[in-house]
Image (cartoon, rainbow, N blue to C red):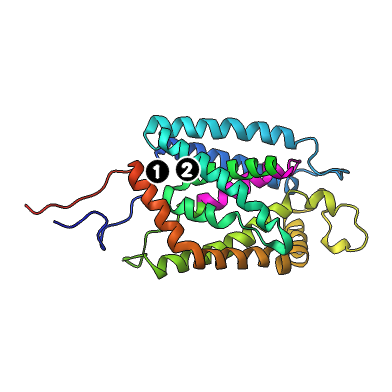
Amino acid sequence: MEPAGGGDTQRIRALPLGPRSAAVLTLASIAGLAMFAWPFVLPASPASVQHSLDAPYVFVAILPVLVLLILVQLTEGGMDAKALAMLGVLSAVNAAVRPLGAGTNGIETVFFLLILSGRVLGPGFGFTLGCTSLFSSALLTSGVGPWLPFQMLASGWVALGAGLLPDRIFGRRLAGRAELAMLAAYGALSAYLFGLIMNLWFWPYLASGTAANPGLAYVPGAPVGENLTRFWWFTLISSTAVWDTGRAVTNVFLVLVLGTPVLGALRRAARRANFAPIVRYEAV
């Protein structure tokens, strides 16, 4: 008899994503992308406070999605009281850890735990954890503002993506150093993507009417390709070299240094909570 979790056994997500949960996440992600990218389609007007009017509506839209996602996972058997308790604990840990970096030069300590949690506990749990972690940390650090709902969505996507990473590449199971290398690479990539999409939430308003760098400014009503080019250069010059790179280096460092013990702790907690059935093979 081969013990559970043997070397050739494919790893199962502790909280698998059911079809209805996947549908909710897909619709939420499409709506979230529309909230970020609508200025490329419809002209946006400059404002003294970016998204000061629509941010409350975005926040109000996110909360029912999180509740619906949790309810759907409860009905599909993907989340129970133990999973909700773990969600609360990890959200509290992230809220306490985030101020250690405080975003100085892009140093963000919150994302590595989101990536590892999404990897172990699945994309649905990861998305919810990303949103709740940023919300709770904002309450703790007085970081509530029009940017918060957009940060919640972007952080949720980071953890969701980690939950969708493959268990095997070219038929070989990813474990040990290979898994850490993949997670570190994803940490770097997601850091740049997070910075890219978070720049989008304010760029049309900040850059409109900016005379210093007219080539980087958003042009209301311009073709999508033109504004995308302007946005690309704005991001490259304003945040990629410093903020996003600092975030990427932090993610890679923390994943490589703390990845093994944190992944082990999360998997032990998932096994003890019996989120997913243990696969066993018995000799006939």
Residue identifier under label 1: 15
Q: Quadrant of residue 167?
A: bottom left
Place of residue 90 in the rendered image (x, y in percent of width and height, measured from the top left): 52, 45
Q: Residue at x 67, y 62 (%)?
A: 107
Q: Earlier in the sequence, mark 1 or mark 2?
A: 1
Of residue 269 and residue 175, the one placed in the foreground of this image is: 269
Q: In the drawing, does residue 17 fall left or right of residue 140?
A: left
Q: Is residue 243 visible?
A: yes
Q: Main secondary structure of the magenta part?
A: helix
Q: Do callouts 1 and 2 mark residues in contact (Cβ within 8 Å)?
A: yes
| Span highlighted in magenta in the image | 141-160
Q: Residue at x 62, y 60 (%)?
A: 191
Whether residue 68 appears in magenta in the rendering, the answer is no
Residue type highlighted by circle 1: Leu
What element does badge 1 sit on?
loop
Q: Quadrant of residue 31?
A: top right
Place of residue 40 in the rendered image (x, y in percent of width and height, measured from the top left): 73, 49
In the displayed structure, would residue 117 be above or below residue 258?
A: above
Q: Is residue 33 visible?
A: no
Q: Which mark is residue 124?
A: 2
Of residue 137 and residue 152, the one placed in the foreground of this image is: 137
Whether residue 158 appears in magenta in the rendering, the answer is yes
